[in-house]
């Protein structure tokens, strides 16, 4: 008799776990894009590295500094640390539409080396082979 009473509770527990499974899906369970700091030094002295601060108002706390996001439009907020002669970091937000299975390398282009004005830009992008293979995407 007690076994029958425990059966509905076990069924409810199993149904609850099954219902929660989609909510626990990670960013790599569907086609994804990666937005990250360009780590390669540029030959152009006016192109400098940035720190990715937020994507779509979610703070990025990963190391290395990258954000795994679903494909589509995003608001990306990046920072440039204080440079020689300046005491404050500066911040800029820009729109970026990402494609599935693509990595984006972000940098900043200084307007002048004597001011703190700059514009963020995507310095390079590349396909993510493991993502394309996992989701059978042919380009």
Image (cartoon, rainbow, N blue to C red):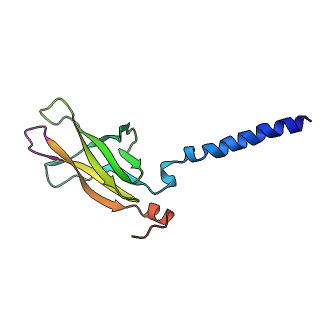
Relative to 46, is 92 above or below? above
Closest to the observer: 85 or 60? Answer: 60
Residue at screen point 87% across, 38% down = 4
* Residue ID at (13%, 50%): 45
Residue 42: percent from left, percent from top: 19, 53
Percent coordinates x, y for residue 66 in the rendering:
36, 46
Q: Residue furthest right?
A: 1
- Quarter of the image that includes the C terminus: bottom left
For the view shown, which residue lies furthest in the bottom direction? 138
Residue 76 percent across, percent down from the top left: 30, 44
Q: Residue at x 45, y 60 (%)?
A: 131
- Is 128 within the magenta? no
Pick the front one: 59 or 56: 56
Image quadrant in which the N terminus is located: top right
- Taking the image as shown, residue 81 lies to the left or right of residue 137, namely left
Say how many tags the image has: 0
Q: Which portion, as a residue range, is magenta?
A: 109-117
Relative horizontal placement of residue 68, taking residue 49 as reference (left or right):
right
Name the chief secondary structure element in magenta: loop
- Relative to residue 139, is residue 11 drawn left or right? right
> Quick check: can you spot residue 136?
yes
Q: Is residue 39 visible?
A: no
In the rendered view, tell whether residue 134 sits above or below residue 64: below
Give the vertical position of 86 relative to 123 (above or below).
above
For image coordinates 77% across by 40% down, the residue present is: 10
The percent coordinates of residue 87 (x first, y second) are: 17, 29
> Magenta stretch containing residue 111, yes or no?
yes
């Amino acid at each position: 008799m007690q076994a029958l009473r425990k059966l509905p509770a076990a069924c409810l527990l199993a149904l609850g776990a099954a219902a929660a499974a989609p909510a626990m899906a990670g960013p790599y369970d569907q086609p994804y894009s990666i937005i990250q700091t360009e780590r390669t030094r540029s030959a152009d002295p006016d192109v400098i590295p940035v720190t990715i601060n937020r994507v779509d108002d979610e703070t990025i706390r990963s190391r290395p500094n990258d954000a795994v996001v679903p494909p589509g439009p995003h608001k990306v907020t990046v920072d440039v640390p204080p440079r020689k002669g300046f005491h404050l970091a500066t911040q800029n937000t820009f729109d970026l539409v990402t494609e599935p299975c693509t990595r984006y390398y972000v940098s900043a282009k200084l307007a002048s080396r004597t001011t703190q004005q700059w514009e963020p830009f995507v310095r390079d992008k590349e396909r993510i082979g493991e993502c394309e293979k996992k989701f059978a995407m042919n380009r």
